[in-house]
Amino acid sequence: MNGRAGVVLAGGIGSRMRSKLPKVLHKLCGREMLLYPVETLRQAGVEYVVVVVSPSNEESVRSLLGDSVEYVVQHQPLGTGHALLQTASVLRDRADHLAVIGGDTPLVRPSSLKSLLDVHLSRRASMSIIVSSADMPTDMGRLARRPDGRVTGIVEAVEANGATVSQEVNGGAYWFQASWLWAQLAQIPIAGRGEFYLTSLAEMAAQQEVGIETLEVSEPSEVLGINDRVQMANAVAALHGRIRGEWMRQGVTMVDPTTTFIDASVHLGQDTIIYPNTMILGPSRVGSECTLGPGSVIRDSQIGDRCRVVASHVEGAVLEEDVEMGPFSHLRTGAYIERGVHLGNFCEVKNSRLGQGSAMGHFGYVGDATVGAGVNLGAGAVTCNYDGVEHQNTVIEDGAFIGSDTMLVAPVRVGEGSITAAGSVVTDDVPPARLAVGVPAKIRRSKRLTEKKR
């Protein structure tokens, strides 16, 4: 054997979260907490990942991760040491070194886990631990050392009872030499709370005088664990800072980073500028040279190059290149906005496609519609798409001019190059190059259109 395996301990009850949702399924920056340690193991080169679950969260965790990992169920909540022991049946003969990380420890970087492995292998350690010496929450376990610096154990906060420990906190991420680990797990002593702590292995290794190594991370937030919603908020803040920093280093400008919120699955193009109080959420993709905000929300959307979205909401929508939008407009699910479209203030588009170069300057609603290229939608124009039972479709062909306060009562079609007069209520199809006037609208020949056609 010379492979690497990894275990994510995700069987904890998480009672301090005060939630019906399993702790490891709470979202941090748009992604479930559990996805972070699983991804960290993968990016650190771990070939085989096992996730320890409880009977209460097994179904939901399987639904999240699918067949990408192996599952082991910890039927009794008897602590982290007991949880790891349950994986022996699937891991004992699979790898010679084993990484272990908590499902509620989402901020450990893959590079840190790789560096810890390098230390672990080069010094032939039996157990290696990620640590931090920064000022950390008091409920985190801390390392005990001899005067010569050798680790003598990890003291859990609930077991401290005045024990003398160092400032170093246990980061909850480890590498173990597998043969040593399997021989020790069943020997872990029971702790005061009736549980078997994985951290007891540090004291056992010290007593046996086998190698214990540590790696201090440069970013203290890496070791943040999550037990309650306060700690989750702290982890989210740290993760947001990390995400913002990575994008700024890749050429994105953030005018006020502290008021800019970007989910982990977002992609941003070079030379995009993000103004304050802007959120980009879900698997959104933003092209290069865009301007977003201030006060915009982009969720689950695709935005092309050189778009401008000011103080507006975009959710489940697609914008091609060179689109201008806002302020105070809203693209809802299914909106597809082609190149060069202008959407001004207080415009709403839902489940509709607006063709290249069309304009909707202000105060309007387009729903369940197909709008051609070069169409002008006047102020107050509305597609009346819901008849009380079903949503109906509207089609506006290329070059049409929809006058202010026009009501298009779907299903209806406005032909190419036609005009609707201001205040018209269009209930029947308008042929190409015609004028619709009145309530209900009557179809007329237009001198303007006739002359234009000539």
Image (cartoon, helix red, strand yellow):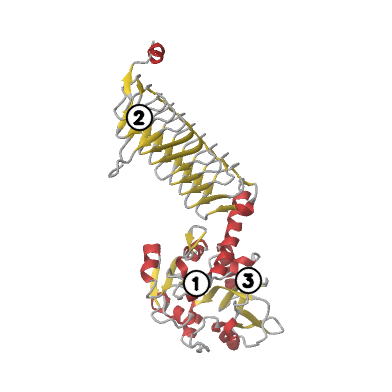
- Residue under the image location 62 percent in, 79 percent down: 142
- Residue under the image location 61 percent in, 76 percent down: 213
Quadrant showing the N terminus: bottom left
Instruction: Name the residue carrying label 2.
Output: 425
Amino acid, disc 2: Val
Compared with 199, 347 (above or below) is above
In-front residue for pair 62/57:
57
CA gap, disc 2 and disc 1: 55 Å
Q: What element carries label 2?
A: strand
Is there any visible trace of residue 156 in the rendered image? no
CA gap, disc 3 and disc 2: 72 Å
Residue 410: name its quadrant. top left
Q: What element carries label 3?
A: strand
Q: What element carries label 1?
A: helix
Q: Earlier in the sequence, mark 2 or mark 1?
A: 1
Amino acid, disc 1: Met
CA gap, disc 3 and disc 1: 30 Å
Q: Position of residue 140 (x, y in %)?
A: 60, 76
Is there any visible trace of residue 32 in the rendered image? yes
> As drawn, is 332 to the left or to the right of 168?
left
Q: Earlier in the sequence, mark 3 or mark 2?
A: 3
Compared with 304, 444 (above or below) is above
Of labels 3 and 2, the one closer to you: 2
Mark identifier at residue 94: none
Q: How crowded is mark 1: few (under 14 residues within 10 Å), some or many (20 or more)?
A: some
In-front residue for pair 207/341:
341
Instruction: Name the residue carrying label 3.
Output: 215
Instruction: Name the residue carrying label 1.
Output: 17
Q: Which of marks 3 and 1 is nearer the N terminus?
A: 1
Of labels 3 and 1, the one closer to you: 1
Q: Position of residue 158 (x, y in %)?
A: 57, 83
User: Tags 3 and 2 in contact by the CB under 8 Å rule?
Assistant: no
